[in-house]
Image (cartoon, grey):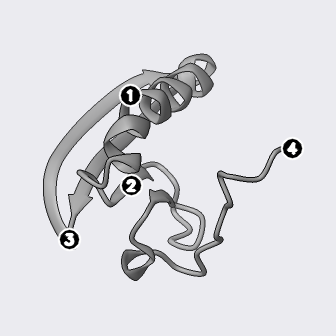
Amino acid sequence: MIIHLAIRRFANGKLLFEQHIELEEDRIEGLIAAAARDNAVMVTAHELHMIEIEFLDEPNVEERFFRFGTDPAGMVAPVRIDLDKSN
């Protein structure tokens, strides 16, 4: 099955980048992991404040978006993660 995604990067509430991707369902985990790795440096350096992955095929708007970053203003029910805590 093919999955359609939109990946967006925001800084200070403004859209900086948008990319649309089609990929096989079995490749989704690798793509999300790669996107997280690629953007982690920018997010922690405060160059980038939010990454949004939109699952374009998902009809339920409540489950359609995955967002992470340092700017909770664009997120619904953000969860704070303490990166200084050891697991």
> Residue 3, image x and y in percent?
47, 33
Discs 1/2, front: 1
Position of 7 with respect to 25 (left or right) is left
Q: What is the distance, in whole Å, between disc 2 and disc 4 at their CAs?
A: 26 Å
Dot 3 amino acid type: Asn
Real-space Cα separation, disc 1 to disc 4, in angstroms: 23 Å
The answer to whether residue 44 is left or right of residue 29 is left
Select label 2 or label 4 by which is in front: 4
Rendered position, 37 above or below 60: above
Tell whether label 3 touches label 4 (CB within 8 Å). Answer: no
**Going from the N terminus, do you reach mark 1 or mark 3 first?**
3
User: Is mark 2 in CB contact (under 8 Å) with mark 4?
Assistant: no
Between tags 1 and 4, which lies in front?
4
| Mark found first going from the N terminus, 2 or 3 | 3
Mark 1 Cα shell of 10 Å, populated few (<14), some (14-19), many (≥20):
few
Answer with left or right where residue 36 lies relative to residue 16: right
Residue sitting at 18 percent across and 46 percent down? 18
Question: Which residue is tagged 4?
Answer: 87
Q: Which residue is identified by label 2?
A: 52
Q: Residue at x 21, y 62 (%)?
A: 11
Question: In the structure shown, which secondary structural element does the residue marked by tag 2 occupy?
Answer: strand
Q: Which of the two marks, 4 or 3, is nearer to us in this view?
A: 4
Q: Secondary structure at mark 1?
A: helix
Q: Quadrant of the C terminus?
A: top right
Q: Nearer the viewer, residue 47 or 50?
A: 47
Numbered disc in front, either 2 or 3: 3
Q: Which residue is rendered at x = 21% and y = 73% of the image?
A: 13
Q: What's the residue type where badge 4 is placed?
A: Asn
Looking at marks 1 and 4 on the same chain, the residue that comes earlier in the sequence is marked by 1
Residue that carries the numbered disc 1 in the rendered image:
38
The tag earlier along the polypeptide, 4 or 3, is: 3
Residue 51 versus residue 54: which sits nearer the camera? 51
